[in-house]
Amino acid sequence: MLPPATRLGPYEVLAPLGAGGMGEVYRARDPRLNREVAIKVLPADVRLDEDRRARFDREARAVAALSHPNVVAIYDVGADGHHVYAVMELLEGETLGARLRREPLPVRRAVEIGAAIAEGLAAAHQRGIVHRDLKPDNVFLTSDGRVKLLDFGLARVSLPGASSDLTTIADATAPGIALGTVGYMSPEQVRGEAVDARADVFALGCLLSEMLSGRPAFVRATAAETFSAILHGEPVGLADASAPRSLVALVEKCLAKAPGDRFQGTADLPFAIRSTITTDAPPASAPSRPSRRLWWVAAVALIVLAAAAYWLRPASDAGAPITSLAVLPFENIGGDPAMEYLSDGLADHVINSLTAAQPGKLRVRPFASVVRFRTRPIDTATVAAALNVDALVIGSVRQQGEDLAISVSLVDAREDAQIWGNRYTSRLADILAVQDRFASDVASTLRLQLTDEEATRLVRRDTNDPEAYLLYRQGMHELNRFSAEGLMAARDLFQRAAQRDPRYAAALAGVARTYVLLGSIHVGPRAAYPEALRALERVRALDPDNPELRVQQGVIHLFHDWNWVEAERELDPSMPDGSELLIPVWNMHGFLLGARGRTQEGIEAIQRGNEVEPLSAPRRAELAQAWLWEGDTARASAEARRALELNPYFFLAHHHLGVAQVLEGRFDEAIATFEKGLTTAPQSALLRGGVALAHARAGRRATAESILDEMENWSPRSGRAYAVAWVHAALGRPDAALAWLRRSAEDRDPFFIWVRSDPLFATLSKDPRFAALIREVGLPS
């Protein structure tokens, strides 16, 4: 062991952290950056073997390029005398192995950890890096709730020229070596065959199985018994684990003996893992024969459209005509989570169909405002009042084999009375063709006097491919989560839908929408908007009248191009094209007004957007942000809390609430708010910067500077520059704050367009360099 004060290159060893078969790990200090790091000193056999040393350097540099929040960051590699070392970020917390040895994990936490591991693996696999030694002691759980993969590319270095992993097996059978490594190896590794990413999928299955059952899946008393269990046995305890069946099925697929029977990659695994326990998520994989569920969606759509026809019948047939309605997600009788995204998809489909026929003449609440009413029971009068609509459609569906049983209730909220109800049983046959005919009948009953073009929009079918349709519906479901992982999962699902049907304009528009949201919320416009533009060009070629073309292009003009004239033209909320169902145009228009310094007008526009979507967490959070422009922390806090009541996981609401608390001097409360948001969005620069900001404002400079050092080393794609500028401003460093603001402008950070109204930069407002920067980058006047 190295004594304290030992120097390894520029690094000073402070204390040992641990030791194992792959070397010794020390806490150390980098005096150049004044930060603490972890240093792994590798064994002599790596140092003395030139080929293995070269392999280590290549793999370390490849992993260093990952820059992923679920992979431990590698800062440096080097040699000093007899020592070869790797310098990594210093983590506080414990390994997954230590946690499992101490206590079992709840199912939801196991799923969160498993999904985070899968995200780290996916990032590595995309670069051609395979871990090959994934086990509980190579997964680190930080004290602030993050998950990090350790020894990625470092833990196992094959013998030069070897095509197998036999060295690991040999090492594991040596005296004194625990069977932890071999207990997580894939069958092909045990057989000494070449491996690929599917070996990591198997190891991930082992980790998930152990987290769920509390027992290692294949570890036995001896190495031979362990190898036999991996090759021929079943995972211990998994069948008896108190976990959703869909989650157990996913683990079993990961643990398939033949690589070809497992998930063939990790790109979709984070989404699939999370889907197994969220009631508002799709199944782990799309069904091989999706037609049943498509028929189900179409069948219920017909009934809801019929309900709309009844409600909206002419006033001469009944009382005052219904001019506004909300279609609630249908209750899924039986509770199969695989059906939930279709229940939501049905509501979304009917909402858009009714609005598309004659935009502006019938007010239908967007899906974002009804999604919270998935749960039953509900009070119809209260719901209708909250949504400010005349009528509701409430339904339920049960599927048994080829049969559907559907119940629909039509409620006139003005009288709090059911005005019609029925129960339908149906066979699943030729329902798509019937849907077109039925939609025409609905239009006739409504006496909408449709033109030929409007009649076409009413029955428009975006795709004839059922599987593409289901992928699109899953994508819409994921998109509504707004998290980075949800948006990336949505993007992948939309792309798969477009691959199945290259003329599926709605799927391509979904791709564009996910990239716009990723760029606006998570990774910055420069990183994502070019991909959105490519998708929009494909949409334009297929459907030049698609309303998403206008609003998405307007958002890109606003946040990326800084083309204020074109942004204002495209984001005109008065255009009656139904685009408010796709993007909150009033809110985007309000953002443009805020960028021009017309904050009060911006607030009024955003309030109009909240009238369109009165129960949408994102819309409430946007209003909270607008009140911050005015420095009205009380209203900002109230709107942020309302957003969190609607969706406790909407991390931007945590951000806006935390900023309001900072401005009010309630620093510890702000830190707690930011950290709670980080449990949902652990890679958010706004939230991490908020923690540092609160510490800086509270006078805890050392803590603030420690977080600042960490963030300054994040990838530029993390959108860190604006938040880093906050902290420098709070620490009284105007030069550094302005330098980081300039980087933020270069990155087209979405928040930068409101920098003049940001109260956190009030100390810079009188600095002539601040005004010069605003003029230089061309913010609108």
Image (spheres, rainbow, N blue to C red):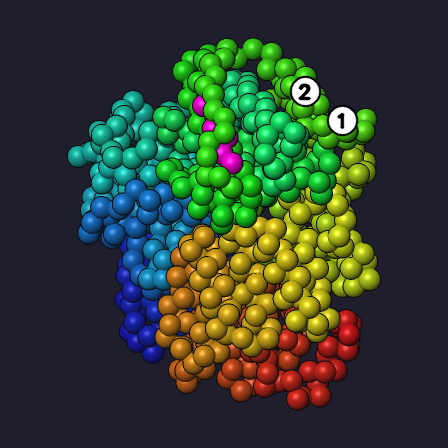
Q: Position of residue 285 (x, y in %)?
A: 48, 29
- Pointers 1 and 2 in contact (C-beta within 8 Å): no
Q: Is residue 214 left or right of residue 441?
A: left
Q: Is residue 101 left or right of residue 206?
A: left
Main secondary structure along the magenta-highlighted residues: strand
Query: In the image, what residue occupies the spot 59% across and 43% down?
Result: 366
Say which of 448 and 469 sits in front. 448
Say which of 309 and 530 sits in front. 309
Q: Which residue is mark 2?
A: 441
Amino acid at dot 2: Asp
Q: Is residue 367 visible?
A: no
Amino acid at dot 1: Thr
| Magenta-drawn stretch contains 727 | no
Whether residue 665 is situated above or below residue 173 in the rendered picture: below
Which portion, as a residue range, is magenta? 406-412
Query: In the image, what residue occupies the spot 27% across and 25% down?
Result: 234
Q: Is residue 394 left or right of residue 333?
A: right
Q: Which residue is mark 1?
A: 456
Occupied quadrant, residue 235 = top left
- Position of the N terminus by quadrant: bottom left
Query: In the image, what residue occupies the spot 59% across and 26% down?
Result: 310
